[in-house]
Amino acid sequence: MTSGGKELAGIFLFVALVAGIPLATDSGVILNFVMMALYAALLAQAWNILGGFGGQFSFGHALFFGTGAYIQAIAQLQGGLNAWLALFMAVAGSAGVGALVGALSFRYGLKGSYFALVTLAFAEVFRILALSVPFTGAGVGLMLPLHESFANMQFGSRKGYVYLVLAFVAAALLLTWWLKHSRFGAYLQAVRDNEDAARAIGVNPFGVKLGAIVLSGGLMGAGGAFYVQVFQYIDPGIAYGPGTSVEALVAAIVGGMGTLWGPVLGALVLHVLADLTRNLFGQLPGINMVIYGMVLVLIVMFLPRGIAGLGATAKSLWKKSGGRRG
Amino acid sequence: MFDSGILFPSLINGLTTGAVYALIALGLTLIYGVLHIINFAHGAALMVALYAVYLLKERFGIDPYLALPLVVPGMFVLGYALQRLIINRASHGKDENILLVTLGLSIVMENAALLFFKSDTRTIETAYTLTTVAIGPAMIALPKLVAFAGALLVSGLLLWIVGKTDLGRAIRAVAKEKHGAKLMGIDVDHVYAMSFGIGLACLGAAACFLLPAYYVNPQVGGGFVLVAFTVVVLGGMGSFVGALLGGLLIGVVESLGGLYLGESLGQIGIFAIFIAVLLFRPQGLFGAKA
Amino acid sequence: MSTRRHFMSQSAAAASAMAFPLVGGAQPRTIKVGVLHPVTGALAYSGQQCRVGALMAIEDINKAGGIKSMGGANIEALLGDAQSQPQAGAAEIEKMNEAGVSAVVGAFASAICLATTQAAAKYNLPHVVDVGVADQIMERGLKNTFRFGPGYRKCAEAAVANLHVLNMAAGKPARTVMIVHEESLFGTGTANLLARELPGYGYEVKEVIKHANPTRDFNNIVLRMKAVNPDIVIPANYYNEYALLVRTMQQQKISPKAIYSVLGGAASSYKFVKEFPDAANGIIDCNHWFNPKDKRSAELKKRVEAKGLFFSYEVFMTYTAMRLLADAIERAKSSDRAAIIDALEKSTFADHIMPYGATKFVNGQNTGAQPLMTQVVKNDIKVIIPREYRETDPVFPLRA
């Protein structure tokens, strides 16, 4: 089997295994954990497409998350649309915002810290706008009415949401797989590694980066729509606050940027870490997060290539120590 | 819509608020200019400095302005140690890792503060907290005027350090070409740590000037980080004069924006400028064309 | 270190439960109750104050012999941290459900309560909302959700009606109003209600100013206040911004006829009165407040202060919410969730320190819940309205 084929088989195996969890257990804790870990994985996967494969570091991915969330809510509340139809609009809308921001910033050649800061600023602008315009409910926020049914994309049990978010994650995995093996993905990685060289061989960096931010934004928007369906409330702080942006990029970097499984691994490890520290030290507010922050620094210190790069890191360490001994 | 009776005080007020932004941004722009990293722990470090000022006042009765000679060197040592012992080692020279490390550090600092100080908002009361000085029709709080003068002084001092001293020459050399600087025998790691230390020392000064008219709690830094980034971008990353002017300008924009657009929406002015500068003049309003 | 002490007593309770295994058919020795608050993150201060209130109530209940109808069973707290995020709150509910709690008390902030009440509803898990003033929490028809205190509609209506009473009694010196509010759910919701109600009583709302959290400088807002010169200033914001606003007003020597805060202000915060006595003087609040005529409220205040904490509304709101729940368990004679919900629905709980009278729930909302008007007088907080709880006569207007 080719390496691409092996990866595809891995994706199907992963989806099949996770799909089995809701059949095996009724535990709300486990189901909620799986749901939130998959949700975090989805956000990290979205970020990874632009940040990991495209080399464009966004600090403001909440921009797409929030836009997806608001469209999902507004389409149902004010447009009277079905939740599933709203989902398509949310994905398309946040991809559109991605196109807009990408067109502006890539047209003017922003990269590195400059691109990071401009995304951060756009997220803030949207947050302030969401606080000021009437159709977002301003500071009061928007609340979806509680009507649990498949047609409304609201499920009485966490199981339904696990399958929903698993479908998103599977789609993101397939999209990432495609990036690794398609011509577009090759162009994107070429632009990441050396934009001038890529241009010299006839790649259009602007178009390629634009494509990446559209895909990334659309996936992130799906994450926002999912959030609204589960928690049924959105306000400007939740939608466009920096928390979601940070969550997405930390999981992707810790897991391993520009890899297929990195974001999933990163999200899983960080969620286990957060849960463990909270359960062990939750009695004293703050201490769990102190430990979480320290472990984050240690992971970066000892796993510079992320968790998915663990093998490569170990190999190079082995070589280094072997070389010294020899 | 508003007479000059409001416009002028609002302008002066914007300038004094902007001076504090400038102080915070000075440290950030130095760190960016030399290390080329975006320091996500800047807000948390400001919070640490504010708690230091608070403790000195509450425990030992030391006036915030007299605390300057304690807090500034203290923050310098903290910054030097953080860069030398943690950030430098953990980053492996990769931007994304530096980002995560500074983020991790800020999580640790914020929650350690929550653990030790609890979540209460704390304020200090000084004899001059409520003193105001009349400048024309504007009544300006004395602590804000002191902060304004302090910001000018600190940026003058920074310009002198970077422009006239041996350390400054080394900093400029490293900022420009770190490999070349290394070949010339400059200890790059030391210069990095010195820059980070000086950057945090600026926060120490900012904290002393800020606390008499403000408050401290574990989350207080977050409110200043974005503004400081804006100021740095506006002034041109790495430019001290730019940071000072940028800070003053942002203070005025925020003040007048609040007056004409409403306090909440008025914040948009800051980010509109931020985006426009990034897109159309990335070297900053006051920076030279690269 | 009250939390650690509590942790140890909890472990001790668990140990004793293990040492005396349950005999078949006997009543359980402990009833687990979830205590869920945002004790970290942006809302940490309020969340930690709430937790203190809940734990003190449990301590009192257990000391007084536990749940008597269940052979003196003790209440055991399961502490949860909502981390100031709705999704973290919902995750804690899942854990509490599986740990076998009989009910949950929490979760302070409205946005978090929306998520936790709904998550608890899936398991028919009774959820007593301690503060959560957004009325949307109660309007979703969740059978498991009960709120002992008033929502912001009730508070805003009371604030306007009582302001009018004050004004009429003083010969109608005040006509114009300026509202300064924070931009999120609580401030915006309250300000919208006030701006709608006030004109009906003949007041002119000159300006409504919304500000961000945090707002680093209030000079601009105070400058506009100077220009507009309203008779009454109504702030609706959180402590940090409130403190900066009032201090800046003091600095700029602005003294309207009244500063009249709705849900959160100096006249319902011992912390503010202690830290800024001059700025606080004369300020009037419409907020959650205890019945000052009930001796137990003074005792409770003393005990909270002995811990080095302020007796803030979070403490007594959660304290009474927990007592309401214990009363319901007492009458349900069971730790069964459905039985407790049933008992809550029929609750007539009257033995409490809040000015609500006997409890009566309609669709989960306690209909007797009401805020009180308080005023800062000589560095203390005194109730001025309504008359049956009055401790001192109101000073209105502050200046002619």
Image (cartoon, coloured by chain):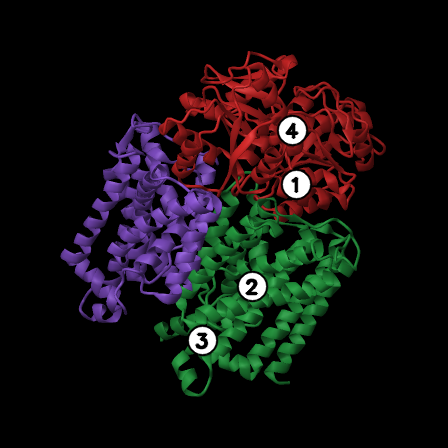
Task: Determine contact: label 1, label 3, CB under 8 Å.
Answer: no
Q: Residue at x 76, y 34 (%)?
A: C364
Q: Residue at x 52, y 45 (%)?
A: A288
The N terminus of chain A lies in which quarter of the figure?
Answer: bottom right
Q: Secondary structure under badge 2? A: helix
Q: Tell me where residue C130 appears, x and y as whole percent.
A: 65, 32
Chain A: drawing colour: green
User: Disc 3 marks which amino acid?
Assistant: Arg
C353, A272: nearer the viewer? C353
- The mark closer to the camera, 4 or 1, is 4
User: Disc 2 marks which amino acid?
Assistant: Ala
Separation of marks 1 and 3 at Cα, in angstroms: 44 Å
Residue on which the image places disc 3 = A192
Residue on which the image places disc 4 = C157
Badge 2 crowding class, 10 Å Cα cut-off, few under 14, some 14 to 19, many 20 or more, is many
Q: Which chain is purple?
A: B
Residue on which the image places disc 2 = A44
A303, A133: nearer the viewer? A133
Please check whether the numbered discs 3 and 2 fall on a single chain.
yes
Please check whether the numbered discs 4 and 1 fall on a single chain.
yes
Q: Secondary structure under badge 3? A: helix
Chain C: drawing colour: red
Task: Please indicate whether residue C153 sits to the left or right of residue B183 in the image.
Answer: right
For residue C113, the mark is 1
Kindly identify which chain the residue marked by label 3 belongs to. A
Q: Is B128 drawn above or below residue C97 in the view shown?
A: above
